[in-house]
Amino acid sequence: MLNGIDVSSWQGDIQVQNMDLDFVIVKATGGTGYINPYCDKVYQRAKKAGKLLGFYHYAHEIGSQGTAVQEAEFFVKQTKNYFGEAIPILDWESDNKHDVKWAKAFLDRVYARTGVRPLFYTYTNIINSYDFSKIARADYGLWIANYGLNAETSGFKQPQPPKSNGWSTTAMFQYNTQTRLPGYGGLLDANVFYGDVNAWKAYVAVNGKPEKPTPTSEPPKLNPTPIGGIKMKEFTLNTNVNLRTAATTSAPIIALLKKGQKVKFNDIVLAGGYLWAVQPRTDQFKKGYISLGEINSYGLIR
């Protein structure tokens, strides 16, 4: 069995190359517009360190929800150079978690476009509340989350997975979200993969062949669209606004900024249909993101 972590923008620019683990799974995209600004940095760092790799799409990211096909196409476009060297995954836990047909259509579209079958990630209470048997029968492997008491712990464990309706076997189990590991100061999601390196690579394989597809000339775009390099600005809030860890309305909140507070920012990004001011920080978050409003309220960007 293999031990590893999954990370998103919440962990920022985590130095995974210094950590004793077998694999790293990185959030890449969400909905039709969110791109994790740290994804490629962490991915390439893990790759250089010889870690096994995975990358995931958060379905129906709040604020940028799309159809299954739209989100699958967005995911593939932004991560196309990862296919053939990492496991793609659908993260299924948003406001459409009841829509099994949507999930199946996304998985089928990604498989048709890339030749790689993604894993399907969700929680025990979700998978046992709806009928996902069509996804299981289509041979999409399962990554299940179930935390039990979820007590803070040090180091990896290798528990047996819970029972999941529709799947006779489980590929991977996310069993704790409060794990401490040397090399990182915060809490992490801990996972066990039920197989060896060759089994992991079988999930990576393109049409069953363990080889990377021919790369395209266009590099992956794994950062929000920068407006870019502006001089430090300051504005005064005329309402309360959440300061978030990433340019998405579903990202964790760093602080509630109050009406009348002065806020400095030195960049603007476009993500999830919104304009976001980027606030430089000196704490563990490095950057904070403040929504300036929906893009389409000012016009339509093509």
Image (cartoon, helix red, strand yellow):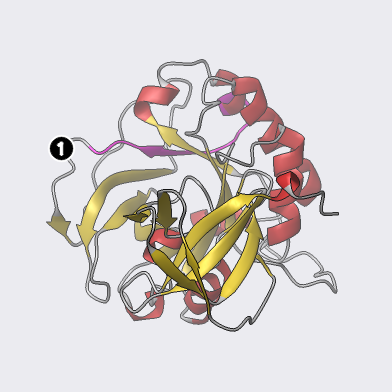
Front position in the image: 155 or 269: 269
Q: Can residue 207 be seen in this view?
A: no
Q: Give the range drawn in magenta.
A: 136-147
Rendered location of residue 9, percent (x, y):
45, 61
Rendered location of residue 229, percent (x, y):
64, 82
What residue did someone put label 1 on?
A: 149
Mark 1, other Cα within 10 Å: few <14 / some 14–19 / many ≥20: few
Against 28, residue 106 (above or below) is above
Front position in the image: 12 or 208: 12
Left or right of residue 202, residue 211 in this image: right
Residue occupying the point 82% across, 54% down: 301
Displayed quadrant of residue 182: bottom left
Residue 195 counted in the magenta span: no
Figure disc tally: 1
Residue 142 counted in the magenta span: yes
Q: What residue type is labelled 1?
A: Leu
Displayed quadrant of residue 302: bottom right
Left or right of residue 181, residue 19 in this image: right
Residue occupying the point 40% across, 37% down: 144
Rendered location of residue 128, percent (x, y):
40, 19
Front position in the image: 208 or 233: 233
Left or right of residue 174, residue 56 in this image: right
Q: Can residue 226 be seen in this view?
A: yes
Rendered location of residue 28, percent (x, y):
57, 57
Residue occupying the point 40% across, 49% down: 240
Displayed quadrant of residue 224: bottom right
Residue occupying the point 82% across, 68% down: 214
Q: What element carries label 1?
A: loop
Q: Name the image quarter holding the N terminus.
A: bottom left
Front position in the image: 187 or 134: 187
